[in-house]
Every structure is written in structure tokens, then in C-alpha cells.
Image: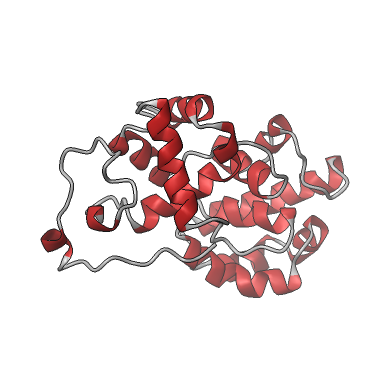
């Protein structure tokens, strides 16, 4: 996609949703970190249902360690891979208490050293909690970037590098959220809602859907920022 088209792409997404934000519910950087770790291979809605009651009693690493793995599993048992995630959350909480004074680190290397925290999770935390310029490439962003021609790549890391390089600076702080929401509600995997797409004329996808195609699958509105 040409630089001018990339700028216009994000200008339109920004016009539709000026203040995008994560749909994961959290209280502070620590609860955000926990929520993102739990969200791997799970929906934000499912994670929020589990963390709502959990975050009423646990808001710090120390409180999580005190809760313990067995009780944590009871709170998150509806989330996929909950046994492994419970182990990771307890262990990362112990490390935060022992090595970081109970605070979530602001450096990528330290975040990625925590159990259950990969590059995508670190990018989300750095961007959402600390306002750093990162773009976390999940399945939605990977699909949108390749399908539209915004930033094609064979791996999430390749797509991330291209997005960081080519997205204009003024759009980078919120680019992550605009792309996720666009992929979640408009540029969906099974059937993209091209008639409702604000950037369809900029998109290189050759098999755009029509209004007739969408009749059997009504579009889901994008929530306001």
C-alpha cells in the first residue's frame, strides 16, 4: 500500500473511532498483564467474565501469590488452557514480587522473561499500560495487514516490522487497537463485511463481499472508544 493510502487508511479508522481502547477489562498494569496472559487462544469476552470476580479480590502480585494456584484455577476454569495459565500467572507474580518490587516492568526484555509472556503480550502491556509505541500483531492484525495489503508478511514478526516502519507516526499510538477492532468486527476471518468497511477502496483484497453476501450474517457494530 502506498504511503498516502496508509495515512488515509488510518485517518478513516480514526474518524470512525477517535479513542480506541482494549476490550480487556483491567484495573492497573498488573491486572492488564494477567488479563493479556489469560487471553491467549481465548476471547476478550470470556476473559472478562472470569477476571471480573477475580480482580475484585486480586489487584497486585502479592495478592495473587496469596490466593494461590488452586484457587486461581477456580476463577479461570472457563478459559482455555487454564491449568497452564494458572501456573504461569502465579509464577510471574512471584517473580514480580521478588525481582521487581511488585511492579510490572516497563522494559520488553524484562517482560518477556516472565512465564507466559511473549512478544505480543509484552507489546500490549507496553502500549496500553505505559503508552509506548508498539504494535502487537495478533491473528486479527495479521489477517487485516495481509488481506488489505497494508503490511504483508509470512510471520507476525515480519508484519510487525513493516507496520512499525510504514505506519505514520501520528497514528502509531493507537494503530494496534484500530487494526484489532477492524479485524474483529469488520474484516472478519470467515466473511469480511466489505460493504460496511471504511477503507474498502484502499484494500487490495480481490474477493470483497457485497451487501447480498452479508444478508445472512448481519454486521456487528464497532463499540465506541
- Which image quarter: residue 16? bottom left
Q: Is residue 198 left or right of residue 70?
A: left
Task: Give the quadrant of the C terminus.
Answer: bottom right
Q: Position of residue 162 (x, y in %)?
A: 46, 25
Q: Residue at x 42, y 34 (%)?
A: 6
Q: Is residue 129 above or below residue 25?
A: above
What residue appears at the point 78 percent right and 44 percent down from the top-left corner? 95
Position in image of residue 107 (x %, y %)? 74, 34
Count numbered badges in the picture. Answer: 0
Q: Is residue 179 visible?
A: no
88 left or right of 140 in image: right
User: Residue 75 is drawn in which quadrant?
Assistant: bottom right
Residue at the far left in the pictured view: 212
Instruction: Tell me if residue 108 comes above or below residue 180 in the rendering.
Output: above
Q: Is residue 2 left or right of residue 129?
A: left
Q: Nearer the viewer, residue 216 or 167?
A: 167
At 82% from the left edge and 58% from the top edge, which residue is drawn?
Answer: 62
Residue 221 vs residue 171, the one in the foreground:
171
Q: Quadrant of the N terminus?
A: top left
Q: Nearer the viewer, residue 146 or 100?
A: 146
- Camera-nearest residue between 224 and 23: 224
Identify the residue at horizontal 52%, vertical 44% (top origin). Answer: 176
- Place of residue 67 in the rendered image (x, y in percent of width and height, measured from the top left): 75, 66
Residue 180: image location, x then y, percent: 45, 49
Res. 52 in view: yes
Amino acid at each position: 500500500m502506498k504511503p498516502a493510502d496508509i495515512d488515509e487508511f488510518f485517518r478513516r479508522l480514526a474518524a470512525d473511532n477517535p479513542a480506541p481502547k482494549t476490550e480487556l477489562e483491567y484495573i492497573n498494569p498488573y491486572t492488564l498483564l494477567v488479563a493479556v496472559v489469560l487471553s491467549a487462544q481465548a476471547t476478550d469476552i470470556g476473559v472478562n467474565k472470569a477476571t471480573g470476580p477475580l480482580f475484585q479480590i486480586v489487584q497486585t502480585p502479592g495478592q495473587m501469590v496469596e490466593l494461590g494456584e488452586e484457587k486461581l484455577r477456580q476463577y479461570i476454569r472457563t478459559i482455555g488452557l487454564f491449568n497452564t495459565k494458572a501456573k504461569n500467572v502465579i509464577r510471574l507474580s512471584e517473580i514480580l514480587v521478588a525481582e521487581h518490587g511488585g511492579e510490572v516492568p516497563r522494559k520488553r526484555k524484562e517482560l518477556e522473561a516472565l512465564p507466559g509472556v511473549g512478544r505480543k503480550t509484552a507489546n500490549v502491556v507496553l502500549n496500553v499500560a505505559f503508552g509506548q509505541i508498539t504494535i502487537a500483531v495478533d491473528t486479527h492484525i495479521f489477517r487485516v495487514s495481509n488481506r488489505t495489503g497494508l503490511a504483508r508478511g509470512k510471520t507476525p514478526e515480519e508484519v510487525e516490522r513493516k507496520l512499525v516502519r510504514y505506519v505514520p507516526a501520528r497514528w502509531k499510538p493507537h494503530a494496534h487497537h484500530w487494526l484489532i477492532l477492524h479485524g474483529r468486527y469488520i474484516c472478519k476471518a470467515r466473511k469480511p463485511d466489505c460493504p460496511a468497511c471504511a477503507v474498502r477502496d484502499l484494500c487490495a483484497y480481490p474477493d470483497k463481499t457485497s451487501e447480498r453476501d452479508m444478508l445472512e450474517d448481519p454486521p456487528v457494530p464497532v463499540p465506541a472508544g
